[in-house]
Image: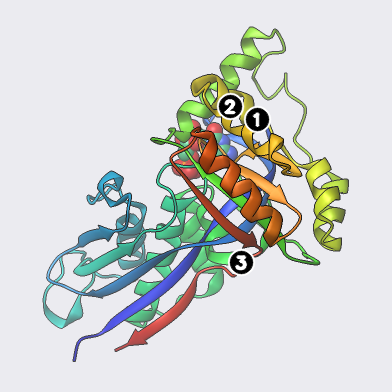
Amino acid sequence: MTASVTVRVPAKVNVQLAVGGLRPDGFHDLANVFLAVGLYDEVTVAPADELRVTCTGPDAGQVPLDRTNLAARAALALAERHGRDGRGGGGGVVGGVHIHIDKDIPVAGGMAGGSADGAGALLACDALWGTGASREELLEICAELGSDVPFSLVGGAALGRGRGELLTPLEVGGTFHWVFAVADGGLSTPAVYAECDRLRETSGTGAGVADVPDPEASAALLDALRTGDAAALAAAVSNDLQAAAVSLRPSLAATLAAGTEAGALAAMVSGSGPTTAFLVTDEAEAAKVADALRASGTCRSVRVTSGPAAGATVLRGSN
Ligand code: C5P
């Protein structure tokens, strides 16, 4: 019998991304308010002789299929912790696993697509291998894999402290409608953080932990999430990486302007970009803003969705 497990994992947008100073370890403390949205990758794992990653979807060509892929790293991390040798072969030994990613989340777009695949592969391998890892252990492995990976597992809405991995779930009192404009090509997250530091240095404020105030979640923003008030959320959204992303990719300014002119309540860069996110009142407004963005010629493609969305979820499993 062929055993396989499929997990569905959402993308995210950061409705607030407050970035503290550069820490000695190269990371930045954050107040990072994540909202999962309904664009999904599906990760399917099945036993194989060796570790193998394949990917389908419009942007599949941009996804690394070697052991730098977060999905591969997640499988190896789980295998290592549970005493498997990582070489595959007899007895269903792990490391020997075929991970297939059906990718719908923009690649290197600031929507946590790679993190989603890491969280998805982890949950899928746990189910396939019957590892029985606790939620705490899965979250710990996620945090080792990357700052955004724990949120991909959890979904919904959450405040991320530390480098973004220390999560507090947030209450959300309604559905928020979004339009995303996908840019041509990706942006490297470390490069965007480095640009943020550079802009802080050149503006004279300094970029270190002693120079930058501790990042704090906005009370108005958390209230807006809790009450489901899109206009109030729009007034409170902020992204400290936006200036850096636009500095590295100046064409994003035209995309943001096109969405604003079309009537979006808020226009912002999603995370480290270059995807841009537009908060709208309802589905009809979403269609209008999406049409205007398509017509503007300032982006590669446009996606309409809403949040919050559930975290990593097992869709199908047989073993
Ligand atoms: O944790 P992750 O691997 O996703 O981080 C990628 C890079 O993004 C880090 O190496 C660092 O340059 C930057 N980063 C940061 N502060 C954070 C999260 C990420 O500087 N809180």
Measure the alpha-carbon separation of dots 3 and 1. Answer: 27 Å
Q: How far apart are marks 2 and 3 (CA)?
A: 29 Å
Relative to 216, is 33 on the left or the right? left
Observer able to see residue 168: no
Which numbered disc, 2 or 3, marks the residue closer to the eye? 2
Task: Determine whether label 3 and label 1 are within 8 Å by CB.
Answer: no
Name the amino acid type tagged 2: Ala
Give the quarter of the image for residue 86.
bottom left
Q: Which quarter of the rendered picture does the C terminus lie within? A: bottom left
Q: Does residue 220 appear anywhere in the picture? A: yes
In the displayed structure image, the side of residue 8 where residue 162 appears, left or right: right
Residue at label 3?
Answer: 309
Residue 155 rendering spot, x and y as whole percentages: 60, 64
Which residue corresponds to mark 2? 254
From the viewer's perspective, is 183 left or right of 231? Answer: left
Residue at numbered disc 1:
257
Instruction: Estimate how packed mark 1 is, as few (under 14), some (14 to 19) or many (20 or more) residues with alpha carbons within 10 Å.
Output: some
Residue 21 place in picture, x, y as percent: 66, 26
Residue 249, given in percent of the width and then of the height, sits at 49, 24
Classify mark 1: helix, strand or loop: helix
- The kind of secondary structure element at disc 2 is helix
Q: Which amino acid does label 3 sit on?
A: Ala
Answer with mark 2 or mark 3, whichever residue precedes in sequence.
Answer: 2
